[in-house]
Image (cartoon, helix red, strand yellow):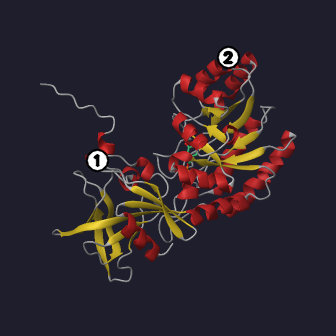
Amino acid sequence: MTNENLLAIAEEHGCPVYVYDSEKIEQQYKRLTSAFSNIESLRIHYAVKALSNITVLKFLNSLGAALDTVSIQEVELGLHAGFQPEQIIYTPNGVSFEEIEEVSTKGVQINIDNLAILEEFGTKHPDIPICIRINPHVMAGGNTNISVGHIDSKFGISIHQIPHVLRIVKNTGMTINGIHMHTGSDILDVGVFLYASNILFDAALQFPDLEFIDFGSGFKVPYYDGDIETNVEEFGEQLTRRFNQFCEEYGRSLTLAFEPGKFLVSEAGYFLVKVNAIKQTTSTVFAQIDSGFNHFIRPMLYGSQHQILNISNPNGKERFYSVVGYICETDTFANNRRISEINPGDILAFRNAGAYCFNMSSNYNSRFRPAEVLWHIGSSHLIRKRESFDDLMRNQIAIDLV
Ligand SMILES: *Cc1c(COP(=O)(O)O)cnc(C)c1O
């Protein structure tokens, strides 16, 4: 997408607005499938929580993706978008037993990460095959908020509890058809990932009825020029070799699954905002934009650094700015960042705004959530309307208390 395309969208739909480039999503999907082209049966489950717009889901369906879901609502969105139940895996954490049962009646693959739940489910529904989420206890994440493999993590069944899983399987007569791990985001060292995979393979040998092994996600994408990223091609080559070796040892060929969210949609997204004002203090030049952490919370929540471009003045002289929002709390998008000269009314584009951006937005400060636009084969399509006052009032009940 060019700056002119983005400016035209800002002009047509107003700011703030999220824009997604379908071509980039397709490129990433193909990059992943090519890296694993020597796997006989590969399944890419797109993690719905990253970006759940129904049109984006339909587009991923058209590419051949399956889905990874974490709530019954995400399952319903997926079914609504046209996915078949057997293309959907449901990996909840800490949800009610009733919700898991309800999802299972839809024919969706259930992934259980708690021994008590596994035992209860196996006792009541021994005929429904279940995937188990294993915690291999490998610290592979880039940040403690998203490293889910450590020993006291709330995610997964500890690898040390496999004997207990085997006992539950024997006592209930249930079938384990899949084994899963998702150790956290931002995997940079293929060696560390393979180390965790070997732990999973060892566990897998103890389950004779497997159909698939799901390696979760953790693909790191670059956030700015020169940022580090997962070497997907090298990873593909090494894991393929190891996986095919495992299948030989196991005695038959299994499906290899992944659950990328960020990798597929992060770089496809742009968040366009308008500059309301420039404010100079004794030490800082603030660019104050028509948004805040109500629309885009990743910099404040995770300290993530999103590149910010002044697309109204891309060739201007670079200056240092703090880009801040309009929320009545500190909401700094970027501190002391070099950006081409900003004037009130300019449109700024935040990069990597596809994953965990719109989907984490809220109505804080009673602001409307932004519109979403899909850029597809050279033209823009509105795929979610900007909210209006009616949306703020919906479900509220005004009572006269006098
Ligand atoms: C969030 C999540 C993913 C996707 O992670 P990304 O870092 O966006 O690729 C995959 N699997 C599970 C179980 C998740 O919770």
Residue 164 in view: yes
Q: Which residue is mark 2?
A: 123
Q: Nearer the viewer, mark 1 or mark 2?
A: 1
Q: Sequence-wise, which precedes: disc 1 or disc 2?
A: 2
User: Residue 210: percent from the left, percent from the top?
Assistant: 77, 35
Which one is in front, 172 or 6?
6
When asked about the image quadrant of residue 371, the answer is bottom left
Circle 1 sits in a helix, a strand or a loop, which is it?
helix
Residue 186 in view: no
Side (left or right) of 381 relative to 291: right
Q: Please tell me whether residue 322 is drawn above or below residue 311 in the rendered image.
A: above
Side (left or right) of 176 relative to 275: right
Q: Amino acid at mark 2?
A: Thr
Q: Is mark 2 within 8 Å of ligand 1?
A: no
Residue at the image position 49 percent from the left and 54 percent from the top: 355
User: Residue 135: percent from the left, percent from the top?
Assistant: 61, 37
When asked about the image quadrant of residue 115, the answer is top right
Residue neighbourhood size for the residue with mark 2, other residues' Cα within 10 Å, grouped as few (<14), some (14–19), many (≥20)? some
Residue neighbourhood size for the residue with mark 1, other residues' Cα within 10 Å, grouped as few (<14), some (14–19), many (≥20)? few
Residue at the image position 78 percent from the left and 49 percent from the top: 41
The reply to whether discs 1 and 2 touch (Cβ–Cβ < 8 Å) is no
> Considering the image in quadrants, where does the C terminus appear?
top left
Q: Please tell me whether residue 158 is drawn above or below residue 306 in the rendered image.
A: above
Side (left or right) of 148 relative to 107: left
Q: Amino acid at mark 1?
A: Phe
Circle 2 sits in a helix, a strand or a loop, which is it?
helix
Q: Which residue is mark 1?
A: 389
Q: Is mark 1 within 8 Å of ligand 1?
A: no
Residue at the image position 61 percent from the left and 40 percent from the top: 79
User: Residue 38: percent from the left, percent from the top?
Assistant: 80, 57
User: Residue 110: percent from the left, percent from the top?
Assistant: 64, 32
